[in-house]
Image: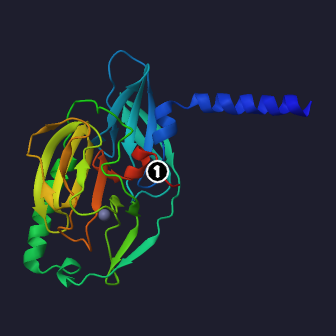
Amino acid sequence: MPRLFAVLLLCLSCSAHAADSYLTRLLNKPVPGGVAVIDLGTGAVAPTARYDGKPVLVVREQDTWRAIVGVPLSVQPGPQQVSSGGRTLTFTVGAKHYPEQHITLKNTRQVNPNPADLSRINAELAVQTTAYRSFSPGTPSNLLLDKPVNGPLSSRFGVRRFFNGEERNPHAGLDFAVPAGTPIKTPAAGKVILVGDYFFNGNTVFVDHGQGFISMFCHMSKIDVKMGQGLARGEVVGRVGSTGRATGPHMHWNISLNDVRVDPAIFIGAFQP
Ligand code: ZN
């Protein structure tokens, strides 16, 4: 009898799992800085969806349309709304703790920029924000991403950062500890929508994977692509370096959805709740 009970329990947990789709199980991490996967139903035509006034990535999984929504790091736990086809769909954001990191920089201008630096920083921010807000119609080649480099993580997403004791923006991406010169490969197919040399990010490339799903790589020693260039999955975009605000060579990678920076670890199966 206890054995039968155990088998029944096993079956129950099987069916509970089967209710979650593949994409939902892998990508649905509805926390600040995470991703919410929302069922938009079936239908012949792709529905559109918006979150916080911005268009959202919608993909088809078998016969079901799903919105893949980026949740801002600044959102408080609780209900959030996505609109689609005149309907309002609610999802709940849970809590997540992000640790602190203290970094010492010799170049104090990188902590407290002078007025000329600030005007440069603001102009660069505007250009990068425009890139993050672009929304091309193509469907991403893959949502489960390849790691752009092979190496251990040296800093996770969302870490609260203090430079020389002063709090600045939290870490918006993942850092990989790899030597200078290591080739950086695009984790999905895409198009180069921005190339630049920026005050904080150094040599930077933005790759648009489709529908607001965008990768950003920075601090590169060398850029190997041009604006507007189409890239196949795995093509090299540049080489690891330490340009911009960096304490040494490493690969920094951001992922953006609906102009929200989310944890890239979700897409490479390395998310830690
Ligand atoms: Zn970083």
- Say which amino acid is labelled 1: Ala
**In the rendered image, is residue 263 in sight?**
yes
Image quarter of the N terminus: top right
Extreme residue toward the right, this view: 1
Is 162 situated above or below 43?
A: below
- At a point 17% along the width and 48% down the height, the residue shown is 131
Extreme residue toward the top, this view: 44
Residue 201 location, quadrant: bottom left
- At a point 39% along the width and 70% down the height, the residue shown is 160
Colour scheme in use: rainbow
- Please provide percent x and percent y for residue 141: 29, 31
Residue 125 location, quadrant: bottom left
**In the rendered image, is residue 156 in sight?**
no
Is 45 situated above or below 72?
A: above
- Please provide percent x and percent y for residue 102: 38, 78
Q: Between 138 and 49, which is closer to the camera in this rendering?
A: 138
Q: Between 82 and 69, which is closer to the camera in this rendering?
A: 69
| Tally of numbered discs | 1
Q: Between 42 and 251, which is closer to the camera in this rendering?
A: 251
- At a point 37% along the width and 51% down the height, the residue shown is 264
- Please provide percent x and percent y for residue 127: 12, 55
Give the class, few, some or many, for how many residues have Cα within 10 Å of label 1's Cα (few <14, many ≥20): few
Is 136 situated above or below 195?
A: above
Q: Mark 1 points at which residue?
A: 270
Image check: 202 left or right of 28?
Answer: left
Q: Kindly state the secondary structure of the residue where label 1 is placed.
A: loop
Image check: 138 left or right of 37?
Answer: left
Q: Between 58 and 177, which is closer to the camera in this rendering?
A: 177
Ligand 1's quadrant is: bottom left
Is 82 situated above or below 104?
A: above
Asked if the residue at label 1 sits under 8 Å from ligand 1, the reply is no
